[in-house]
Image: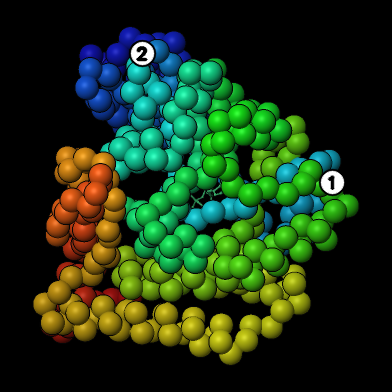
Amino acid sequence: MGISTPSFMKKYFTDEEITKLQKKNALHTGQFNELILIRLTKDYKDYPRGTVFYKGGFIPGYPRIMRVLHLKNGINRYFKDRFYVEEKVDGYNVRITIVNGNPLAFTRGGFICPFTTNRIPDLIDLNFFYKYPGYIINGEVVGPGSPYNTEVIPYIKEDVVFFSFDLFDKSGKNLSAEERYRILEQFKIPHVRKWGPFSISDVDTVREVVLELDRDGREGIVAKPIPDGRPIKYVTLSSCLRDLQATANLITELPAGFYIQRILRAIFFCHEFGISLDDHYLLESAKALYLSPERVLKEVADGGNVRESFQIKIRSKNTTYELMEHLNRSGVSTKLLSIEKTDDYYSSKFHRIYTKGTREIRHRLMGHGFFD
Ligand code: ATP
């Protein structure tokens, strides 16, 4: 076992496994005050990427969710019996728990998110953990005050809101949906909307739910089998357009597959629901795909950068610096613009800067050739 790997890892892995993981560079050590945290950077056996180990236990990584492009057939294919349907909300994934007395929020990759950690008291009732010590609340932080997402969320006008959608007990077991609803309700922990229970013969009702979500500008659903099993996710047509609108300014950054996926999701949705894409949808998609990048090109030609703007609300000034460090550590360049005191909070503005994309556009503007 390597010198840098603490002995508590032996509770989870054999010496050979630890060596194997180290060779793959899959164990990253971090620290929070005195606390040593080991972050798993690749899926390994029952532990998903983003699992965090520490002396007193571990925080399971949030598992990937399989997507279906045909709702009815997906439900019939994967579910045998009853299931719940939950709203899929679009923000960033966090796991909130208390480790050694510290309320902490972990990102999907297993980093402590300084912003979310700072805002935990605004997001949930921490008394929950007195009754359920060691439990881990999984959910999504959504809203225009997010430090990670820029997509316009039509149903949240300011700051951020937390929606829980999974609950792990202290042994790392994902509780059944019914148990989770019951436990989270006791402390009024905000939860995504849910429908059901349904059986597979209710698929038409599920389709109605999806159509309503689509009309309301919501992202989609995650259907979860009862009592447990693998969930499936399905998104609305309108969410595909919003994704294009939110990201087309980053066309030089994102893989082409990102856009192809949205087009496929949209046409599968139309096929299943018997919808024809109207001129509004088509025009807005084309506008997003051409006009946003065109604006970015102009900005870079004028000496600017490919960038996104964020404004967040925090309880302490220092959290802004910690967040910048956290983003920089994860390979994101930032420029802090301002920190202002507003009542009991601070409001910070910053840019996320995409240096590689900026350089690429600049080179092309300068006439550099390339093979495509
Ligand atoms: P994945 O990791 O599942 O392949 P992803 O990280 O690209 O996917 P999405 O495609 O947006 O993310 O879908 C999965 C994510 O949706 C989950 O990781 C979770 O953060 C989020 N989510 C939102 N609402 C729910 C919900 N009700 N139940 C489960 N997950 C939800």
Colour pattern of the rendering: rainbow
Q: Is tag 1's residue or tag 2's residue first in the polypeptide sequence?
A: 2
> Which residue has dot 1 on it?
199
Regarding residue 328, the answer to whether it shows in the image is: no
- The type of residue carrying mark 2 is Lys
- The type of residue carrying mark 1 is Ser
**Which percent across, then down, holds residue 185?**
62, 34
**Which percent across, then down, holds residue 186?**
61, 29
Identify the residue at image location x=83%, y=61%. Answer: 204
Q: Is residue 22 above or below residue 274?
A: above
Residue 6: quadrant of the picture: top left
**SS for tag 2?**
loop
**Which percent across, then down, holds residue 19?**
35, 20
Classed neighbour count for the residue bearing mark 1: other residues with Cα under 10 Å, few (<14), some (14–19), many (≥20):
some
| Disc marking residue 55 | 2
Q: Is residue 10 above or below residue 183?
A: above
Identify the residue at image location x=72%, y=60%. Answer: 209
User: Assess mark 1: CB under 8 A from ligand 1?
Assistant: no
